[in-house]
Image: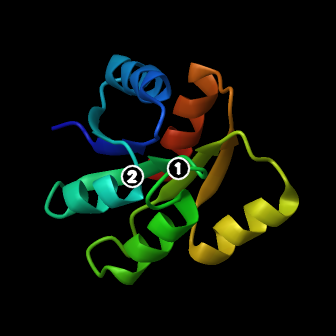
Amino acid sequence: MSKVIMTVDDSASVRQMVSFTLKQAGYGVLEASDGKDALSKIEGAGVAMVLTDLNMPNMDGIELIRALRANPSCKFVPIVMLTTESQPEKKQEGKTAGATGWIVKPFKPDQLLAVIKKVLG
């Protein structure tokens, strides 16, 4: 069975692009439109990794990471930020919250898949 990756972004077009890239590479995909949506879908979904945007309504990426890290079943799930933000202080905030990695948008599909392979081993 293929590994399932959750993509969390308030932009439907970004979710579609990420989803397409992941499915082409043989991964299963679970989509969520913001942090709250992600939390409601992740329990019991067997997610191997989470890709999340930073700036989203309802619950942003940093809040989502903190919530996932506080959940015993998601404590060790790799979480990669996929965002337009590239300031060092934002990256540090993400790392402090528990992010595994950081990809700046716009991304190249090969770059995204290389990071995923590296993180998932």
Task: Count residues near mark 1 (Cα–Cα under 10 Å), then give few for <14, some for 14-19, many for 20+.
Answer: some
Q: x, y (%) of residue 22?
A: 39, 27
Residue at left offset 48%, top offset 32%: 11
Q: Which amino acid type corresponds to the residue marked 1 in the rendered image?
A: Met
Image quadrant containing the N terminus: top left
Vertical comparison of 85 with 93: above or below: above
Q: Position of residue 80 (x, y in %)?
A: 55, 52
Furthest residue to the front? 58
Mark 2: amino acid = Met
**Badge 1 element:** loop
Residue in view at x 65 percent, y 66 percent: 94
Q: Secondary structure at mark 2?
A: strand
Residue placed at 41% from the left, 75% from the top? Answer: 67
Quarter occupied by residue 72: bottom left
| Residue 97 percent across, percent down from the top left | 59, 75
Can residue 30 be seen here? yes
| Extreme residue in the right direction | 88
The residue where tag 2 is placed is 49
Seen at 32% across and 55% down, the residue is: 38
Cβ atoms at labels 1 and 2 below 8 Å apart: no
Residue 121 is at least partly visible in this image = no
Q: Is residue 46 left or right of residue 91?
A: left
Say which of 76 and 106 sits in front: 106
Residue at the spot of label 1: 56
Q: Nearer the viewer, mark 1 or mark 2?
A: 1
Where residue 34 appears, as percent x and y from the top left, is 41, 50
The image's mark for residue 12 is none
Q: Report how far apart the C-alphas of labels 1 and 2 lie in the structure.
A: 19 Å
Q: Is residue 108 above or below residue 118?
A: above
Sequence-first tag of 1 and 2: 2
